[in-house]
Image: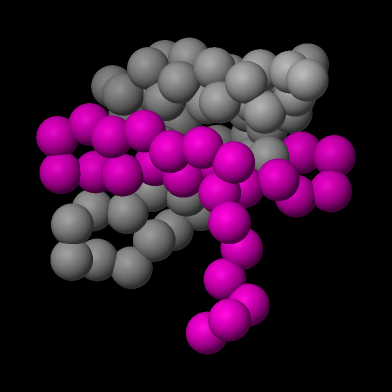
Amino acid sequence: MGNEPTPVGEFNRDTWRFAVYPERQLYRVEAREVGSKGLVICRTGPFTNPEWYRTWHIDAWRPWIELETRKVITSHQSP
């Protein structure tokens, strides 16, 4: 329980919450719909293209998720 990583940022859309976690040299993006368990939907870095998992690579929200994730990463890396 006390081992839960802290996200460097979060954003929401409809009933979904997206959280961005630092992970070595990349960032992990998890999606969680209200009342459900979170799942990893992609990994990306500040200068890399996201590696999408499951069917998220064809999801209509993918461009928006990528944009919001980049905002979080940029904010996290800014001094």
- In x, y percent, where is residue 57? 46, 31
Q: Which residues are magenta?
A: 1-26
6 in relation to 69, above or below: below
Residue at the far right in the pictured view: 25
Q: Is residue 60 left or right of residue 68?
A: left
> Going 48% across and 15% down the picture, which residue do you hit?
67
Let me know if residue 20 appears in the view.
yes
Q: Nearer the viewer, residue 51 or 11?
A: 11
Q: Is residue 45 left or right of residue 40?
A: right
- In x, y percent, where is residue 32? 32, 54
> Going 38% across and 48% down the picture, which residue do you hit?
31
- In x, y percent, where is residue 3? 63, 77
> Going 54% across and 17% down the picture, which residue do you hit?
71
Which image quadrant is residue 2 in?
bottom right
Give the total of numbered labels: 0
Residue at the far front in the pictured view: 79
